[in-house]
Image: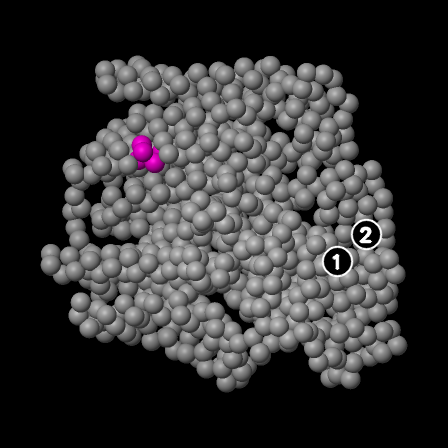
Amino acid sequence: MAELGFSCLLLGLSLSCFGVIGNLIGIITNSQELIVSSRRAIYMTTFCISISIISLIYLFISNDFSIKYVHDHSNLAMDKSYVWVAFYSGNEGSLLYITFILTLASSIVIRFNFLKTKLIIPWATTILSGVIFFYCLVLSFYANPFKSIGTEVVDGIGINPLLTHPGMFSHPPMLMAGLAIITIPFALANASLIHGKKLDDWINIGRITTLISWGILGAGMLLGAWWAYTILGWGGYWSWDPIENVALMPWLILTAFIHSIMVQKRRGMFQVWNIILLNIAFILAQFGTFINRGGPVVSVHSFASSTLGYVFLSFLIFSLIFSFVIFFWRIPKIQSKRNIESFLSRESSFLINNFLLLSITFIIFWGVIYPLFSDVIRNISVTVAAPYFNRTNGPLLLLLVIMMGIGPLIPWRKSDKKILFKKILFPLGISLLILLSLIIIIGLKNYIPIIAFASMGFALSSICYEWISDTKNRISSGDKIITAWWNLINSNRARHGGYIVHISIIMIGMGVIGTNFFEERTDQAIHLKESVILDNYRIEYIDLIQKSRSDRITNSAYMNVYKINPIQYEEYSSENTKGFKITEKNISPDDKNIGTIVLKHEFYPSFNQISVRSGILSTPIEDIYVIPRDFLDDGRIGIAVSINPMAWWLWAAGPFFILGTMFALWPSRNDIKKNINQK
Amino acid sequence: MSSKKKNLLYLSLFPFLIFGCINENDLSLEQRSYQLSKQIMCPICEAQTLDQSQSQLSKDMKKTILNLLDEGKTNEEIRDFFTNRYGEEVLASPPQKGFNVFLWIVPSIIFLTGILIIFNVYKNMKKTN
């Protein structure tokens, strides 16, 4: 089976090589047969890579530990459902997976679009074959997943225990797929640039593929954050780790693209700029691969690290040179037909949106490479983590939220100041209301969350304002409320899908501000039957169950959570700490039990690794989040109790994000009609 | 440069100034130690702060932070204490002094360059109209 898998890899390598050369010769000699044949080579590559994948999965299922990759990433004790995770948990397997996604996506796009974008497809196929060729090359010679150990082996080392979590079934493959699919719009954009004449042909399919990549990447990052929050046991969800940053950067650039492509679609402007954005996104995705696999930066995500850094660095430099050469070769021929007409126009607001997103991306990029910079120049290692990123990006993200409220209100081309002022009055009023009520009624003193909540209220109410006023117009022409709203958002799916995504971003914003600025936290060590009191809650330690399995020792601590009246416990509180502990006899009978949580602490001796699962009681207002720290010899358990306000909204945003993206992607009746007419 | 433009430039610096002014005297020792545990890295773990790490060393370091706070040390003195022991790497982000000013100044430069580019776009817009 390993031989079959490896032969298919080699076959894929030669086919993709033919895809590049055949296409180039076909284009030069104008030979249609050669172009068609090399297009079909991509379909065949997809088939070969699928066979490789099936062989690797078969090797995992049949426990063939004589294969090094299988030996290193699974063992007999591993549950078979984790084969899917084990398959991409290392460098070689994940590269095979990326190659598969890339070939599959390329085949689909080429197969179903070569009529509409006929002229640029040969060039796009060339570029895609080139990228696939590179990955097949790496797989065949540098990271062969089918490498044999040489002798028979009874059992493998096993999968990294941190990865055995349901979140791992979707988070890594989604991120890798999202990053791989960026190649498609990149290839289409550069193909149209090389072709030189059809600069608007690619934008529909380019926008769709970008939205798919962007949606998958975004959902993947959210899932990763959710996984970190529930399993990593440090109470956070985003740590500005280099690997997180290199996934976020292309996503931000794609976000800029899906806004500015609308300007090209509607007004025929930003043609060159959109191609630049995709070039940056692709190069940043390559930068991510480089950092992830043997890059020089320290990260917590070192699951797929390898010594292949220089291979990916070479490819990064090659893609950089490639896009620069194509760009400067073609750019003198292209001129924008139109200019921005007014500062107060939709075009202009997208320009500012792009500027903010690019600034944030470059600021993150600088933070990622600064440790290298410092190391090279003055030979001192430094760490750049959360304090830098929060402080520099925080204000810009806030401006972005405000723009999210203003942008949609401004019409294309130019707007009347008076009409704009009228429209902006309602959201402005709402945000002022939020501002004042936060200061006067709730009595907040820290101005950052106040400004943040007011801005988010502004953005949200501006969407609501538009929906309400446009729905009203439709009602007056005889529709019912729900059908009126449904018809409204269906009249322009790209726009209203965008609004749904904006709402999900505001929900994420609420979670971020809530957990960062209003978190309460205390560290305590308690015996059985003792309680920790924090804010309005009492957490009582009721039971401990210990289990030994073949690969791990599990301690599960059970705790009851009670809602309390803090005044009843005032006499036990201490001045220095926010939380405090009390014994069984001091418990008030008025406390209301609101749930039981389980804290898990698992030790894996063969990996010398601890995996901690926090106990979480989640409500839309706040999460009670308890991390098990230590199991002390005297029977006490050391716990960190925190109250994370509004963390629930971070995860509730996920479905809205996916829904909004799918809604924006859903083809309208007009699109389908056009398609049929063309064929 | 006209005075209007200058004012706009100053205004664009404003967002960078408003963040990060937290008065440490308002916070309890527990809160301060929690904050510090987010600003100091675990020296033996890969890219984890003391707060995130489960290692014994980071537990000991958290105890040291509490002891130093009890002695009345300021946050800066505590950060310096760990920097002297483990090198600059132990801070989650380097301080805004010496060579590291570079790290903190570049974001403003990026932002200002962007502002200038946008200004140019609008200037061209006025010309062509």
> Is A544 above or below relative to A154?
below
Q: Position of residue B88 (x, y in %)?
A: 54, 55
Chain letter of the residue carrying label 1:
A
Q: Which residues are magenta?
A: A319-323
Q: Quadrant of residue A192?
A: top left
Q: Is residue A451 highlighted in magenta?
A: no
Which amino acid type is shown beneath numbered disc 1? Pro
Towards the viewer: A621 or A439: A439
In the picture of the structure, the residue carrying the numbered disc 2 is A555
Question: Who's the residue at 44% across and 73% down the image?
Answer: A451
Towards the viewer: A499 or B81: B81
> Is A88 above or below relative to A253?
above
Left or right: A669 in relation to A367: left
Chain letter of the residue carrying label 2:
A
Q: Quadrant of residue A676?
A: top left
In the picture of the structure, the residue carrying the numbered disc 1 is A628
Q: What is the spatial separation of the Cα atoms under label 2 and label 1, in whole angstroms?
A: 10 Å
Q: Position of residue B94 (x, y in %)?
A: 50, 58
Helix, strand or loop at label 1? It is strand
Left or right: A159 in relation to A288: right
Residue B128 visible, this angle: yes
Give residue A237's mark: none
Which amino acid type is shown beneath numbered disc 2? Asn
Q: Identify the main secondary structure in magenta.
A: helix
Question: Who's the residue at 59% across and 72% down the image?
Answer: B74
Q: Position of residue A427 (x, y in %)?
A: 38, 73
Pointer 2 with pointer 1, Cβ within 8 A: yes
Disc 1 crowd rating (10 Å Cα; few below 14, some 14-19, many 20+) is: many
> Is A134 above or below relative to A643?
above
Question: Who's the residue at 61% across and 20% down the image?
Answer: A147
Helix, strand or loop at label 2? It is strand
